[in-house]
Amino acid sequence: MFFETDKREDMSLLTKIVAMSLSGRLHDIDRFKRRPADVQHEQFKMLMSKVKHTPFGVAHGMKGKCDYAKFVKNIPVRDYDKLRPFINRIRCGEGDILWPEKTKWYAKSSGTTSSRSKYIPITETSLQHCHYRGSSDVLALYLKNHPKSKLFSGKTMTLGGSHRLETSDGALTGDLSAILISNTPFFASFKRTPSASIALIPDFEKKVEAICKKCSKEKVTAFAGVPSWNLVLMNKVLEYTGKSNLLEVWPSLELFMHGGISFLPYRDIYRQLIPSDKMNYMETYNASEGFFAMQDDPNDDAMLLMLDYEIFYEFLPVADLDNPEKAVPLEGVETGVNYAMIISTSGGLWRYMIGDTVTFTSTNPYKIKITGRTKQYINAFGEELMVDNAERAIHAASLATGAVIAEYTVAPIFMDSADAKGAHEWLIEFKTAPSDMALFTEELDKALRQLNSDYDAKRSGNTTLYPPKVRALPEGTFYKWMSLRGKLGGQNKIPRLSSERDYVEALLEIFE
């Protein structure tokens, strides 16, 4: 048994029941941890048996027996723009083009940098066997690691997306959260707050106001969502209630299930809002395209790659982004290499490059950390600066100076003459300003040089890069900027790194 009797005595009765009902999944998780190649082969075989019956499979010569070599030869790696024609066909009612099943929903996502919306197909199969399985596995692993939990003695608060489900071209579209909330069974809705009618209010500010009125009076034991937008909500809750921290509002609060962006810049802020060593934080990797990974060990901030969600994984070294032939299946990866993730799924995504980059910290079992986006990095001067470098460096500088970061973005300062040198401009909104801004900048630069050898080479002797330029922005600047762009809430993310100056210039216009 995974939940021994002597450890259950502090659990609420309902939490005990849920833990027992989910314990079977722990056997499945243990199996793919022990036999990852076998499980991924099973996923591949199942997916191939389905795609060969679709117009997409027929067009790509997938009829008959299909091994990995044939799969790679016949189906090219695609990003969204290259898959868009097939998705548009099924959105217009052509039927099971990508997957032998009617596609009921499309997760609408603009990503971080693109102004054009993406419509990610969500089939009933992928909804049940990927997204919802991931959500239940989060609970299974959490309760395994915290056998005295009282999670279900209260409710889990969720901050829904900014798009309701709406009919478009005969299909239902909306944020992934809108799709999940709209399809949540009644028995699961019983322990979630707020109600779907509040969670799906399109206007972010009106939704936050309604959540404050409703949820501040309930017993909340957990909350889930993107750290940045939940931070906005939590500050509004404190303002509404007049309390100094969240434990005064919800004394039984024990868990924050977070994802979407790195938690590192927000960790200190949440510790101030929830001043308790008993508060738990669990990272998940759940995107519109699928539920991919979750933190299975509270003492390890890497996430376990989930291998039985009807997803077949491939990984392309970021250094070889222009050569998709370098992509390898799971058993071909190495630790410490930065990879772009490629997926084939029961949602009808085939060799789809989702745009995220990861690195493996372990191959036994397979554990990953998200390092950034394939289009979110700075390489204006050959420095190859990735989001993960920025997150860790800004954390190190904050620790050294007592600073707490609310938001930030970075862009290059370009050379303006043949003999000039470039730099990086950091626009930072501080929750707590550093004790010494010059020291903060120095520590930031030092950490970047330690983390990234390419950056260090360009900074050595100011060869190509001058030290970074840090500008502190007034509180609320990033929120105002996102509001002006119509990107409040949901899965909208503030771009951390960009090789262009568009975002920085727009923010400076607000600031100045």
Image: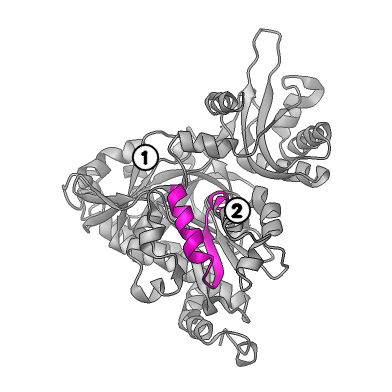
Q: Amino acid at mark 1?
A: Tyr
Picture layout, residue 507 above or below residue 271:
above
Q: Quadrant of the N terminus?
A: bottom right
Left or right, 373 with respect to 302, comes to left
Decide which of 198, 33 is in the foreground and name it. 198
Q: Distance between the Cα atoms at labels 1 and 2?
A: 36 Å
Q: Which residue is mark 1?
A: 80
Q: Residues within 10 Å of mark 1 (few under 14, many from 20)?
A: some
Picture layout, residue 384 above or below residue 62:
above
Decide which of 36, 195 is in the foreground and name it. 195
Q: Which residue is mark 2?
A: 235
Which of the 4 quarters of the picture holds residue 51? Answer: bottom left
The residue located at (73%, 25%) in the rendering is: 458
The residue located at (32%, 65%) in the rendering is: 183
The residue located at (49%, 61%) in the rendering is: 213
Front tag of 1 and 2: 2
Of labels 1 and 2, earlier in sequence is 1
Left or right, 350 with respect to 26, comes to left
The residue located at (20%, 44%) in the rendering is: 169
Asked whether residue 42 appears in the rendered view, the answer is no
Decide which of 316, 121 is in the foreground and name it. 121
* Residue 242 image point, x, y percent: 63, 59
* Residue 240 image point, x, y percent: 57, 57
Q: Quadrant of the C terminus?
A: top right
Magenta span: 204-232
* Residue 98 image point, x, y percent: 26, 50
Which of the 4 quarters of the picture holds residue 406? Answer: top right
Left or right, 271 with respect to 106, comes to right
Asked whether residue 155 appears in the rendered view, the answer is yes
Q: Amino acid at mark 2?
A: Asn
Q: Main secondary structure of the magenta part?
A: helix
Look at the image and say whether residue 47 sits in the magenta stretch: no
